[in-house]
Image (cartoon, helix red, strand yellow):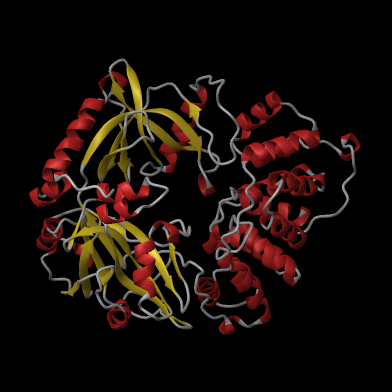
Amino acid sequence: MERFAQAAETVAARSGRLEKIAGLAEYLRQLEDDDLVAAVRFFTGRPFAARDDRTLSLGGATIARVASRLWGFGDAELRAAYRATGDLGAALGKLVRPPSAMTLLPAESLAPASLARIFDAIADIAGKNANARREAGLERILRTCVDPLVAAYVVKIVTGDLRIGLREGLVVDAIAQAFAVAPEAVRRAVMASGDVGAAAAAAKRGTLADVRVAHGAPIGFMLASPISCAPSYPQLAGNAWTFEDKYDGIRVQAHVGSETVRLFSRTLNDVSGSYPEVTRALADLRCEAVFDGEIVAMRDGRVLPFRHLQARLRRKRLDDELLREVPLTYVAFDLLAVGDALLLDEPYVRRRARLATLVPSNGGISVAPFAHLGEAADVNALFEAARARGNEGLMIKRADSPYVPGRRGKWWYKLKRELATLDAVVIAVEWGHGKRSGVLSDYTFAVRDGDRFAAIGKAYSGLTDAEIAELTRWFLEHKLPDSRRRINARSHEIPVRPQVVLEIAFDVVQKSDLHESGFALRFPRIVRIRDDKPPEEIDTLARVREIYDAMLRRESGDLLAVDRQPRRRSH
């Protein structure tokens, strides 16, 4: 793991994309097969393959406790190290004690493959004293970490937070460079197998063409670039386009097999258990395929607003009454694979044509309607028609577009209207991730409620790198003490002086117990920094209630009538 850690440091120190790829490729081509498979998985920030839904079940508190027991540091030392780095791995790396200070000397050396085997053992632990046995496995790992840099990166792998500015796409490019193969071939193998490690091994052996679709292994979602309503749309010129409604639901990738159905969220988490009626409807298709689509709440053929669906998301246990109250439909709008064939490179209209042959509308599943109208279509009229149908907006997709996971570009656009904006004050910040791991880029913001500030959401996007860097310096100089704060591997808010005002745009405001304001904003993003506005003049909680009430009034009268009508409860 010493070589892994040094390679990670090399990648982190290089700012350019090509330099990062070259540094990682140089390391990868030196590895034996087992170490190669494990190392590339680790470089994507995962202890396991993407298709593997196992977890280590080792939280930040557990990691800190085991490390403290092993290396003999106190809470004050850990807090100071964390404040200095904003990263649990880097903080613990500073606290590693030399072997002479340990009760026992390290019993084994650590390499990517041997670390992966210990991870396998920890993930498979269940039953009596499972937590204690997992801690023992973690202690076995940390005992080998006599080098501070190795300790830092081992903890980063355990927490899934490498923070060296390396996305999976760059890892794929590094594999291609290391073994002189086409990046597209590696990327295709990763998407088909759901395992960047397996793709790396195939690239080294020259067997990328033999990799087949592994149903149940999630594929990254293709993303759309947002555009605003305008009199004309020059970005559509020169190409043929298709138009479909943008649904106000939950984006879900459905893997339908001969015996099982698995549903994956935008974060590639398995959410099959939350939507039993959807999995049953998909199982009736009797095919092997991978679909992209949206789960929506639907009643009488009309999509309900997202707040209806939110009632399902908040409930951990489902009963027959809830299933009747919020009926769900899976609306499929793309087809990614059929049998062993991956369809990502086929044109969108061809994928759509094949989709229509597989999915009959049966109540629990349907195909999203779309129109192939070309660049001369009246986009704004189509947008208003979609809104009149109760949907969020319009999707505009090039007829010849491939399916490109994880990327925004000029193939797909989404057109929707923001609900409103709010001026809010930042009350807490967190260190960012990936290329923003060294700056405070995650902001918790609040509105005014009398003499206090009430949190209403978090925003991560919208500012330039220069603005974030400037705000980072300011926030570090204006931190507030908070003795209740605990070290956490995944989230560590730093309370700050409430002075920076941001204008926040959002799509929906909904009631929520998550924030003390009692509301949450859906898809919040930063419009600008309001240097011209003091915290005393930000929007109030009363204003949020006004926006919420106005949103409900704008919903069509028939939906409101259905929503307000008393329903019989089953006894």
Picture coordinates of residue 6, whole percent (x, y): 73, 52
Q: Is residue 247 above or below residue 454?
A: below
On screen, residue 503 versus residue 148, left or right, reads: left
Q: Is residue 8 above or below residue 413?
A: above
Picture coordinates of residue 458, whole percent (x, y): 39, 37
Picture coordinates of residue 355, whole percent (x, y): 31, 79
Which of the pair 475/354 is nearer the observer?
354
Quarter of image, res 139: top right
On screen, residue 58 versus residue 420, left or right, reads: right
On screen, residue 315 versus residue 123, left or right, reads: left
Quarter of image, res 45: bottom right
Residue 222 in view in this figure: no
In this view, the residue farthest toward the top is 451
* Residue at the image position 42 percent from the left and 35 percent from the top: 443
Quarter of image, res 287: bottom left
Quadrant where the image shows the N terminus: bottom right
Which of the pair 518/298 is nearer the observer?
298
Picture coordinates of residue 467, whole percent (x, y): 41, 37
* Residue at the image position 68 percent from the left and 58 percent from the top: 124
Which of the pair 422/25 is nearer the observer?
422
Residue 302 in view in this figure: yes
* Residue at the image position 71 percent from the left and 69 percent from the top: 29
